[in-house]
Amino acid sequence: MPFHLDQLSVPLVQAPLAGGASTPELVAAVNSTGALGFLAAGYRTADGMRQQLVRTRELTSRPFGVNLFVPGAVDPAAAAAVGAYRDELRSEAERFGITLPVPAAEDDDAWEAKVGILLDEPAPVVSFTFGLPSPAEAEALRRAGSLLLATVTTVAEAEAAQAAGMDALCVQGPEAGGHRATHDIAAEPETVPLPDLLAAVRERMRLPLVAAGGLGSGEDVAAVLRGGACAAQLGTLYLRAHESGASQTHKDALADARFDTTAVTRAFSGRPARGLRNRFIDAHDGAAPSAYPHVHHLTRGLRSAAAEAGDAERLHLWAGARYRLARCAPAAEITRALWEETRAVLSAVAE
């Protein structure tokens, strides 16, 4: 039988966390509590995604999700500006003794190959970030047995997702950590607070809604559940979990008093993304073109070198607004504690 979100005994979703933080072990740990874990296919090769699918199925028999990055069109002027940005970052690369690459003109993150694998080896849930699949792709994935979940940041994106045949929507608010899921690469993300965005989408849509963005406490989760969401999605809360694949530099920065605020920047990838404000953001945010994934590939080696060197000032420290609530503990413990806290809040409100 196809999976439905109302089958979750614990209405919490671990965000996909592309870039290495999501691991099969993290997914299985979250799943063990009755919540929903997610693999991130973004930035992985198609074979790398397949290997994670196999490993996850070895670790858990419960439903889990796989998130795909939908390729989008880049404005030619923005792509042309990547060269100048490369020149600006040369001194940063020299610090680590590396040479910045010249990003390829085209990169669709192995979209067709990944969709093909998910048709042959279906996942219970397939979600989409940065856009939507074609109607034919959506229908094929649904026929294969997957529930389709689109990430949206505006009412217009939600309407497009419903028209494209999505089964559910993940409504992402402005305080989310990491990339905003805007469907237009060049668009500046809207700042409508999550409660208001959730209410606006709920008024127009009849699809199940998962609320995401800046959630971290039982009060946060209870608020979105009372606001009409069927589940709450959290990512930053799991970055320091024992099973997280995030770099130690990233994990440590989340608890470092030096980093006391977050900022939305294109400096690391060319797409708007929220992370701990550091020297790299301050120095380069204004020069970064809206060219994704060109800028992502340009800075990838630099970021890897910074992580290995423990240089948090030059690393993409993705984090949502509630990042101080992330703690070093097993993911199952984090999930259970959050759900117990949520239940207590809901019970107190009901009395």
Image (cartoon, rainbow, N blue to C red):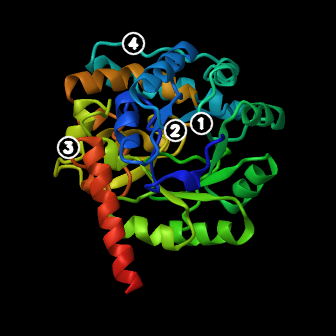
Can you say whether 100 is above or below 272 in the image?
above
Give the amino acid at mark 2: Pro
Binning the other alpha carbons within 10 Å of mark 4 as few (below 14), some (14 to 19) or many (20 upward) gives some
Q: Earlier in the sequence, mark 4 or mark 2?
A: 2
Q: Which mark is residue 328?
A: 3
Q: Is residue 87 left or right of residue 336?
A: right
State the CA–CA distance, disc 1 to disc 2: 6 Å
Instruction: Please provide percent x and percent y for residue 83.
Output: 55, 23
- Residue visible at 39% across and 27% down in the picture: 59
Q: CA distance from mark 3 to mark 2?
A: 25 Å
Q: Earlier in the sequence, mark 3 or mark 4?
A: 4
Given the image, on which type of amino acid does mark 1 rest?
Pro
Give the Cα separation between the discs numbered 3 and 4: 35 Å
Amino acid under label 3? Cys
Query: Answer yes or no: do the residues labelled 1 and 2 have beta carbons within 8 Å?
Result: yes
From the top left corner, tell me how far across and down residue 4 is, in percent: 61, 49
Q: Is residue 240 visible?
A: no
Which residue is under mark 1? 124
Question: Which of the marked residues, 3 or 2, is nearer the chain's N terminus?
Answer: 2
Q: Residues within 10 Å of mark 2 (few under 14, many from 20)?
A: many
Name the residue that disc number 4 marks.
99
The residue lying at 60 percent from left, 33 percent from top is: 69
- Residue 186 or 254: which is nearer the viewer? 254
The residue positioned farthest toward the bottom in the image shown: 351
Q: Residue at x 44, y 58 (%)?
A: 175
**Looking at the rendered structure, which numbered label has been put on residue 63?**
2
Which of the two discs, 3 and 4, sits closer to the camera?
3
Image position, residue 47 (x, y; %) = 54, 13
User: Badge 3, how many Cα within 10 Å: few under 14, some, many 20+?
Assistant: some
Drawn side of residue 9 relative to residue 164, left or right: left
